[in-house]
Image (cartoon, coloured by chain):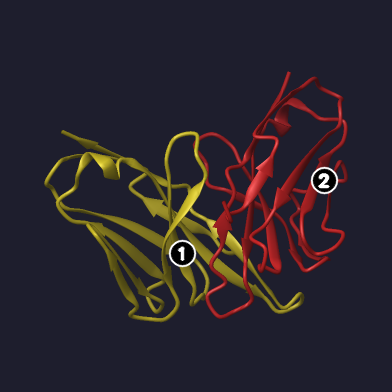
Chain colours: A red, B yellow
């Protein structure tokens, strides 16, 4: 499978714990995006990388959230001191430089904070 | 700030009927994307529309873009049950400060096709 992959697919954690998600983009894609999607809503942009550089962060990304893409390949999204409001589907997408910038989405990581 | 609105939010239609989903956006953009999402699944790219007047068709779905009206439509022809899903439009907003595009999604249209 050469699509975008995410790990884990599901994560249940207790409030206050830290969690980390991983995204592996399509191999030749240099752009990587993180989104959060809650039930009944469209994806909300969190952050964006071009290669290893984090070029934009949403206001939604509080200081408890951090994302990295150390070698311009896979990316991690960490949430510290999780809160119940963090429960959502976290989606990763990648795209290739080019006019269309069409994004390809991974299967998502569903986070439940109890 | 760019806002993207879809209507209707919910659509229940009979098989064989035609219908149109609308996507309005509030600021200038020349890039619009349509996605399909099945329950519990991720987003599947359907169409990429990159210029005024762009029209694309795949099977029973046809998408168009009018950048002057800031409107895109997704037309469904002779609906079948397999088209039941949630459809999202997304508009790309260029940020001149970062030199990048940010994607703003609509709230989605939940389509149910009844046999």
Chain that bears disc 2: A
Q: Position of residue B103 (x, y in %)?
A: 59, 62
Q: Which residue is mark 1?
A: B33
Contact between marks 2 and 1 (CB within 8 A): the answer is no
A14 to the left or right of A42:
right
Whole-number angstrom distance, CA of label 2 to CA of label 1: 28 Å
Which residue is outermost to the front? A1
At x 69%, y 61%, the residue is A32
Which numbered dot is residue A19?
A: none
Viewer-closest of A3 and B20: A3
| Quadrant hosting residue B81 | top left
| Quadrant hosting residue B9 | top left
Q: Quadrant of the C terminus of chain A?
A: top right
Q: Position of residue B58 (x, y in %)?
A: 28, 63
Viewer-closest of B114 and A63: B114
Which residue is outermost to the left? B16
Viewer-closest of A81 and A105: A105
Viewer-closest of B18 and B36: B36
Q: Secondary structure at mark 2?
A: loop
Q: Position of residue B113 (x, y in %)?
A: 23, 38
Q: Which residue is mark 2?
A: A62
At x 67%, y 44%, the residue is A6
At x 77%, y 61%, the residue is A73
């Amino acid at each position: 499978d050469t699509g975008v992959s995410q790990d884990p697919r599901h994560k249940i954690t207790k409030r206050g714990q830290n969690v980390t998600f991983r995204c592996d983009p399509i191999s030749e894609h240099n752009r990587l995006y993180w989104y959060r999607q809650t039930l009944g809503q469209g994806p909300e942009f969190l952050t964006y990388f071009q290669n290893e550089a984090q070029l934009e962060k949403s206001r939604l990304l509080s200081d408890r959230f951090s994302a990295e893409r150390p070698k311009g390949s896979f990316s991690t999204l960490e949430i510290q001191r999780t809160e119940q409001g963090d429960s959502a589907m976290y989606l990763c997408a990648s795209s290739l430089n080019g006019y269309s910038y069409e994004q390809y989405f991974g299967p998502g990581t569903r986070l439940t904070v109890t | 700030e760019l806002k993207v609105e879809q209507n209707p939010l919910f659509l229940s239609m009979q098989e064989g009927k035609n219908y149109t989903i609308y996507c309005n956006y509030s600021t200038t953009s020349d890039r619009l994307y349509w996605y399909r999402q099945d329950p519990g699944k991720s987003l599947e790219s359907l169409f990429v529309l990159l210029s005024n007047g762009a029209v694309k068709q795949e099977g029973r779905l046809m998408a168009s873009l009018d950048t002057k009206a800031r409107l895109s439509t997704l037309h469904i022809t002779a609906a079948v049950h397999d088209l039941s899903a949630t459809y999202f439009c997304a508009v790309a907003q260029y940020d001149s400060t970062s030199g990048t595009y940010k994607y703003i999604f609509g709230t989605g249209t939940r389509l149910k096709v009844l046999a």
